[in-house]
Structure formats: C-alpha cells, structure tokens
C-alpha cells in the first residue's frame, strides 16, 4: 500500500474512515460492558472541543507551552486532593494506567539502586490479581515479579502470603483498589503497615477504582481505606479516562513526596540536540488529552460525579442481585465497585458469552487463573444503566440456551493435543495446527468464540501467551495489495 499520488477530498477521506468502523463493537448503544466509558453526548462534545483546542500544543516543553504545564499541575492537584494527599504530593499526567504503573515500577527500581545498591536482582511482590501491567513493567525493566496467591473467596490480597514472600531483594509491594478482574479492594492498610515494617515502597493501583471509590464512600458504601490517607502508601495511580470519562489516554501517577518522584524523571544532555527532560515515558505529546481531562472534570463537577456514582452504584447492586438470583451462576468475590465477575459450576460460561453476543450484548471473557475460575466480566457505565433489566432477562435466557450445548467448548482431540504440548519445544507450526483445530483460519475469527476461549483456558498460561504472540504477530502485518 502506498500514499495516494494525489490528495483525496475531505468528505471522501472521512467516508472511508467511517467505513473502517463497520465491524467495531457498537459502544454507543450502552450494550457493551467493557472498554468504553461513555459520559453522554453533552460531555462528549465538551471533551472533543477541548481536545481540539490543544491538539497541536506540545507538552514536551512546558517553557514553550506553559498552558500544558498549568493543565498538568492542576490535574495532579485535583487528583491528589481526591486521593487523600496533601500539598506535598507530586505527580504527572500519563497516557494510561500501564504507563503510570511502569513509571511507579521504574521509580521503585531506581530508588532502590540509589538507596540499596547491594540489591542486584530486585523483586516486587504481586498478588495474583494485580494488573498484567506490573508484569509487563517487570519484563521491560528487568525486575523479578513474585506472584503470591490471593484469598479465593474474597479475591483480595493475602497479607500473610505477601509477608512470607518478602526477601532481601524485595523493593516494592503492590495492592489494587480495585482489582480489575473482581472489583475488590485489597487490604491496603495492612499492606501499608507491612511496607513500613520492612521499609519498602507500596504502590496502589487505583487506575480502575481511584476516581469513583471516594464517591461511593460518600454515598455510604463500605469502601476500605486505600489512598494517601493510609500510612505506608508511597505512590498511587489513577485513570481519568475510565470513570472520570476523559478522552483516552489520560491517567496520573502520584507520589507522596518529590524526593521519590525524582527517580521517575529522565534527563539527557549527552547528545548534539536539545536537552531532553522527560518526567514520563513519552517525550513529544499532544496537549489534547490534558485539556480534555481538565475540561470534563470542570464540566461534570463534583456534584455531577456524585450523582453518576449514585446511579452506577445502584445499577451494580441490582445486577449483582440479579446474577445471584440465577441458580446456575455465582459471583466471584463481592464487588466493591461497578465491576462484576461471575461464573458457573454447571454451564460453560464461554457459551453464555457467545449467546449474549447473538442478542446484541458484549460481555468480556476472563480465563481461569490462580483459583479464579473462568468467568464473565462486566464494567457498569452510565450508558448501560437503562439496560439492566433487559440484560438480566437475556442473561437468564442465554444460561438456559447454554445448558443445551456441550459442557466442553473444545473437541476432545484438541484437549488431548493441548495436554501433550511442551512450552520448550512448540513452534509456530504447532500453533498453526492448534488454530486450525479450534476453527481459526488465517487471521479471521469465528462468529462464536467459545472454542477459542476454551482452548486458551485449557492451556497453561505460558503456552497461551506464546499462542497469542504468534497470532498477533501474524495479525499486524501489511494489508494485501
């Protein structure tokens, strides 16, 4: 594919772009329970206009574009106040939760290099429910991730398991508020005490829950302490582009004081160009996400967010009660936020997901891992509130339909083949055979995904990772000429 020799008219360009979306998930309908956080049309217009106002401003250099510095420092200040921090809390705006987490891990690593130079193989302790971004950070930054089991009833971090995992090489403890998979808050106060006892840093991943949890608490929900009000918490990440409804990507990484944050900043004067000073991973970055986040916080306001939280909390409780009323289903944990995971001991949940799709619902599959059975995940948004009862009615019908389908979503021949695979000897050709047996031809996906999900769920995680790497390595390639 080449750049067109002559330009294409604006209307035709936009028409072609619109056509690209033909097979995308219809998130505007409110029937998509993942990925998109919809504030409504009015707020969306404000977000778009603010974004476009600062589209070309470059936050690389705050001396050239001081407006971007003001936007960032005001966003950090609002986030710090929202999360129990005082005037000494510092932070930076990032592109998303993964960048915020990677910066927290990078800061912990470099802090340990300066303060504990005897450590040669730094470790961070991760409850099994900690976001995959921590393992990605460990992979990129050469840390050892030490995974520990969680309580398989509450799906919260087990503090004693964390305590037993601490070694002379430990530099960072991690807790979630909330964990994405189950929507529960880890025992942050107890983890904070543990961090203080062992003179360790503690990062709280509040990317999902940090914004709404304070509102839920104000509404009377029993929200555990999780932020800078907890002694021992040294850093917190929170996304604006989730339940603050900012445009993607908008997150913030906060530190209790600037003496710690200095290890996040990268500076380079050892080349022939301009001096590089990067507080975050990005260098050049548009002012658009900054302006959009600032705008939506001011447009919706504290009272507006409190009302959104009230509606979402009520919807979450109704959905949880509705799921528990279906005999074949059970919740995984007791959600403390508007994230719900549920499973079945008698019906294949991947069939339920496929049946929901035929009725126009997108719900998210989650594979089994570390005591968390394969399950269905829901993120409840304002746009979904009007659909609570219809969704529950269809869910009941889909469970009944799934009961008529095979309990196993993959053929016995494939299951037997998977059991013989050796992670050390599998090849791209092996995975190609697995794809074929699961019904995948080329890079296209079948209409029903239960077979794919069942195969991934049956594989050891290491093999599932290899298989998905092969698939995506093939997926992202040049289109046919």
Image (cartoon, grey):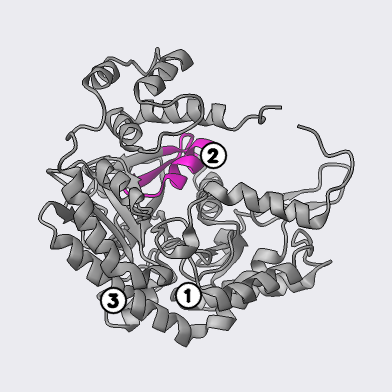
Q: Is residue 389 above or below residue 109?
A: below
Density class for disc 1 (Cα within 10 Å; few <14, some 14-19, many ≥20) is many
Q: Residue furthest bottom?
A: 303
* Image coordinates for residue 301, horizontal then vertical, percent: 52, 84
What residue is rendered at 20% in x and 32% in y? 408
What residue is rendered at 86% in x and 51% in y? 274
N-terminal label among 1 and 3 = 1
Q: Is residue 9 above or below residue 319?
A: above
**Residue 11 seen by the camera:** yes
* Image coordinates for residue 169, horizontal then vertical, percent: 40, 40
* Image coordinates for residue 217, horizontal then vertical, percent: 32, 78
N-terminal label among 1 and 2 = 1
* Image disc number at residue 85: 1
* Marks 1/2: CA–CA distance: 28 Å
- Judging from the image, what secondary structure is the residue with disc 3 in? helix
Q: Please tell me whether residue 128 belongs to the stretch shown in magenta.
A: yes
* Marks 1/3: CA–CA distance: 28 Å
**Which residue carries the number 2 mark?**
141
* Image disc number at residue 480: none
Q: Is residue 400 above or below residue 73?
A: above
**Which residue carries the number 3 mark?**
314
Q: Which residues are magenta?
A: 118-144
């Amino acid at each position: 594919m080449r750049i067109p020799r002559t330009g294409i008219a604006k209307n035709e360009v936009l028409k072609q772009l619109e056509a690209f979306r033909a097979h995308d998930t219809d998130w505007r309908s409110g029937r998509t329970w993942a990925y998109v956080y919809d504030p409504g049309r009015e707020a969306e217009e404000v977000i778009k206009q603010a974004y476009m106002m600062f589209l070309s401003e470059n936050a690389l250099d705050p001396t050239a574009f001081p407006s971007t510095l003001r936007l960032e420092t005001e966003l950090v200040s609002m986030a710090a106040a929202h999360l129990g921090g005082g005037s000494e809390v510092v932070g930076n705006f990032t592109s998303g939760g993964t960048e915020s987490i990677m910066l927290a891990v990078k800061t912990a690593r470099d802090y340990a290099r300066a303060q504990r130079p005897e450590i040669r193989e730094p470790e961070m302790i991760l409850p099994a429910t900690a976001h995959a971004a921590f393992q990605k950070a460990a992979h990129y930054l050469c840390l050892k991730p030490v995974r520990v089991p969680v309580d398989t009833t509450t799906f919260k971090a087990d503090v004693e398991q964390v305590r037993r995992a601490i070694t002379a090489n430990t530099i960072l403890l991690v807790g979630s508020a909330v964990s994405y998979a189950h929507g529960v808050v880890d025992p942050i106060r107890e983890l904070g005490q543990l961090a203080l006892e062992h003179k360790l840093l503690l990062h709280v991943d509040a990317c999902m829950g940090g914004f709404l949890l304070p509102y839920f608490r104000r509404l009377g929900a029993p929200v555990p302490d999780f932020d800078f009000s907890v002694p021992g918490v040294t850093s917190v990440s929170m996304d604006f582009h989730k339940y603050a409804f900012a445009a993607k990507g908008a997150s913030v990484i906060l530190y209790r004081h600037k003496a710690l944050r200095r290890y996040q900043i990268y500076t380079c004067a050892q080349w022939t160009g301009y001096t590089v000073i990067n507080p975050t991973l990005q260098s050049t970055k548009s002012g658009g996400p900054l302006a959009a986040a600032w705008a939506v916080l001011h447009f919706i306001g504290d009272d507006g967010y409190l009302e959104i939280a009230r509606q979402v909390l009520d919807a979450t409780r109704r959905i949880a009660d509705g799921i528990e009323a279906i005999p074949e289903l059970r919740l995984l944990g007791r959600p403390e936020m508007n994230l719900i995971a549920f499973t079945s001991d008698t019906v294949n949940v991947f069939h339920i997901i496929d049946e929901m799709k035929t009725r126009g619902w997108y719900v998210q599959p989650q594979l089994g891992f570390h005591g968390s059975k394969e399950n269905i995940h829901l993120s409840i948004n304002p746009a979904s509130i009007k659909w609570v009862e219809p969704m529950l009615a269809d869910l009941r019908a889909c469970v009944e339909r799934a009961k008529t389908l095979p309990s196993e979503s993959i053929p016995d021949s494939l299951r037997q083949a998977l059991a013989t695979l050796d992670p050390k000897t599998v090849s791209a050709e092996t995975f190609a055979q697995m794809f074929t047996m699961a019904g995948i031809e080329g890079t296209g996906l079948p209409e029903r995904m239960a077979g794919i999900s069942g195969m991934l769920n049956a594989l050891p995680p290491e093999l599932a990772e290899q298989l998905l790497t092969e698939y995506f390595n093939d997926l992202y390639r040049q289109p046919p000429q």
